[in-house]
Amino acid sequence: MTKLLLSVHVLAAILVIGPIAVAASLFPRYARQAADDAGRAAGVAALLHRICRGYTVVGIAVPVFGIATGAQLGVLTDPWLIISLVLTAIAAVILAMGILPGQKRMLGAAQDLLATATRLTMLTGIFNVLWAIVVVLMIVRPGSTTGA
């Protein structure tokens, strides 16, 4: 059962968080282009926002299966897992409270697009770095007996 839970957790992380990271990273560029010329760039920006929004809903599977895997392994109180969960929660808040609303504002042609795009780029960078740290923690697992 543990192998199944871990497999679903890892697959969900790759197939859900990866597209959010890429789409969120590309969004500011296309949204700025759409403000100058509402051609193809506007459609791409709207698609990238839909990807981020849609995958966010499915993204809950990553921590759910991660916690289930941790419970099966008996490591829920290990510091590396607690830190990973906290970082995951912070990344989720950044996505839900910063990135998605910022994208929506840019799609609505809000004023000061450059400042919004700059802020989105920064938030997306932080979001991606948090996930990179979580991945490292999942692999290194301080105190692990696997030799990693």
Image (cartoon, rainbow, N blue to C red):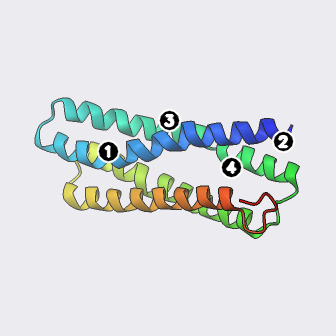
Q: Mark 4 or mark 1, which is nearer the start of the sequence?
A: 1
What element does badge 2 sit on?
helix
Q: CA distance from mark 1 to mark 4?
A: 25 Å
- Classify 10 Å Cα crowding around label 4: few (below 14), some (14-19), many (20 and above): some
Residue under pointer 2:
2
Residue type at tag 1: Phe
129 displayed left or right of 141: left
Q: Residue furthest left?
A: 36
- Are the residues at dot 2 and dot 4 in contact (C-beta closer than 8 Å)? no
142 displayed left or right of 37: right
Q: CA distance from mark 3 to mark 1?
A: 15 Å
Residue 146 drawn at (x, y percent): 79, 57
Look at 64% across and 37% down and name the residue there.
11
Q: Mark 2 or mark 3, which is nearer the start of the sequence?
A: 2
Which mark, by number, is residue 54?
A: 3
Q: CA distance from mark 3 to mark 2?
A: 28 Å
Residue 19 drawn at (x, y percent): 47, 39
What element does badge 1 sit on?
helix
What element does badge 3 sit on?
helix
Which mark, by number, is residue 27?
A: 1
Residue type at tag 2: Thr
Q: Can see residue 108?
A: no
Q: Nearer the viewer, mark 4 or mark 3?
A: 4
104 displayed left or right of 84: left
